[in-house]
Image (spheres, rainbow, N blue to C red):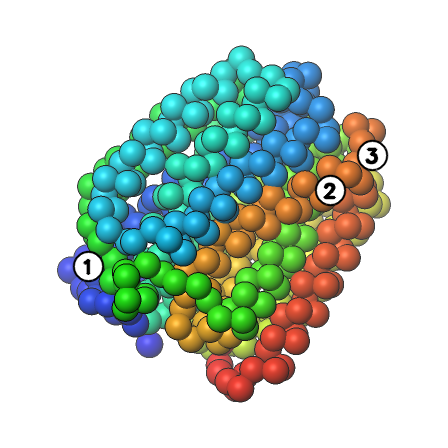
Amino acid sequence: MESLPHSHTLVHDAVGPDLPLDEVLAAIALGVVSLLLAGVLSAVLGELADEHRLSAARIGLTASFEALSMGTTTALAGVFLPPRHLRWLAAGAVVLLSVADLSTLNASGGSIMAIRTLAGIPEGILLWITVGMIARTATPERWSGVFFTALTSGQLVVALLFAQWILPSYGADGGFVALAGLSLFGIVAAIIIPPNYAPLAQNDGASGVPPLRGWFALFATLIYIGATATVGIFLQPLAHEAGLSAKVAWTAIWVSLAAQIAGGASATLAAGHVRYFTVFAVSSAIVIATWLTYLAHPPAWLFIASTAVGGYITIFYSPFLIPMTIEADPSRRAAVLSGSTQVLAGALGPFAASFVVSDGNVHGAIRLGTVLLLIGLGLIAALHFTSKSNSHPS
């Protein structure tokens, strides 16, 4: 079994040559940059709503459009873009992302939605580079766990800074300035990543289109992850409906991110030892329980604790989407699209929820999320129990 190696050890790949650890970690760092905003998105959008620059419905739409743009870009790159000239692509994407963050300053309403939609394009390129590396490794669930652990660690630091200093002192615009500056650190990673990846398809160097079962796995991912995104984006309005302040929501975010670090580390250790369907079945029950807590107008400590439990579980199960997809499509073409599908799910959930919430009541997002989660679990069950290789340990 592959373990975390020292700095001069190669990371074993199932597709193409083994990669030096520094190049693998640099590719992971780019994924962290691409999703850094996601860790504080509910706080930033909630602050924009408190500043009367976005309505409650537009919170969901803004998150949806950015995620849709990001996911679509990642998906199109996975299908059509040859994995070459990665360093130049990464550097350009980092610069464009920082420009987009700065362009959000003083914007409101439709302008914010348009700018964040454009920001999804460079974010999608950066995520494509990360997912492409993970999908080619011999133990993708393990390196996916490393990625999620690194991501949530970075998001935790940012969430703490936002909750304790940036948002109270400088508001949403201060948050976007900070994100623009942090994104530029991705230039260092862009210099280190591999210049090219080995192609998954042998004919033209492109990744190619997955088979039918691969598409089914991606659809199951879309519905299941979309369910959690349906609820998570409305964390600050949910706190307000429980009679709690924005600071409680911000605290819940950074405590949840701390729990997510533990969830990512646990998934890394569990990789190869537990069946993915078992993970999703147990996780679904726990996630629904945390959502029901929100409906009960909990006190601050219980709101924060429930959010932390939900954060741990959602990060713990996320790496197991990769082995599920590889079981359905051993060519790994669908696995390369798993990351973009998860991002698209982040667009589907808030977009659907925008039709069942209002400025005074966002509990409809919880009801919708529960339905979607159960449907997604049913699709995962159908995929697993009809697979010829469902005896695989992951």
Mark 1 belongs to which amino acid?
Pro
* Image mark for residue 20: 1
Looking at the image, do the residues carrying marks 3 and 1 touch, with CB atoms under 8 Å apart? no
Where is mark 3, residue-wise?
A: 361
Of 307 and 334, nearer the camera is: 334
Q: Few, some or many C-alpha atoms within 10 Å of disc 2 (few <14, some 14-19, many ≥20)?
A: many
| Residue 108 on image: x %, y % | 60, 17
Please, what is the three-letter code of the amino acid marked with disc 3?
Asn
Outermost front residue: 203
Would you say the residues marked 3 and 2 are in contact, meaning their CB atoms lie under 8 Å apart?
Answer: no
Q: Residue at x 27, y 36 (%)?
A: 91
Q: Give the residue displayed 54% in from the left and 53% down from the top.
A: 342
The answer to which quarter of the image holds residue 2 is: bottom left
Q: Quadrant of the N terminus?
A: bottom left
**Of callouts 3 and 1, the N-terminal one:** 1
Label 3 vs label 2: CA separation?
11 Å
Amino acid identity at mark 2: Ala
Question: Residue 353 bears which disc, if any?
Answer: 2
Is residue 365 depicted above or below 315 in this figure? above
The residue located at (53%, 54%) in the rendering is 341
Residue 89 horizontal/vertical position (percent): 28, 41
Which image quadrant for residue 277? bottom right
Seen at 72% across and 44% down, the residue is: 352
Location of residue 214 in the rendering, given as x and y in whole percent from the top left corner: 51, 69
Graded by Cα atoms within 10 Å as few (under 14), some (14 to 19) or many (20 or more), the crowding at tag 1 reads some
Q: Position of residue 359 (x, y in %)?
A: 79, 28
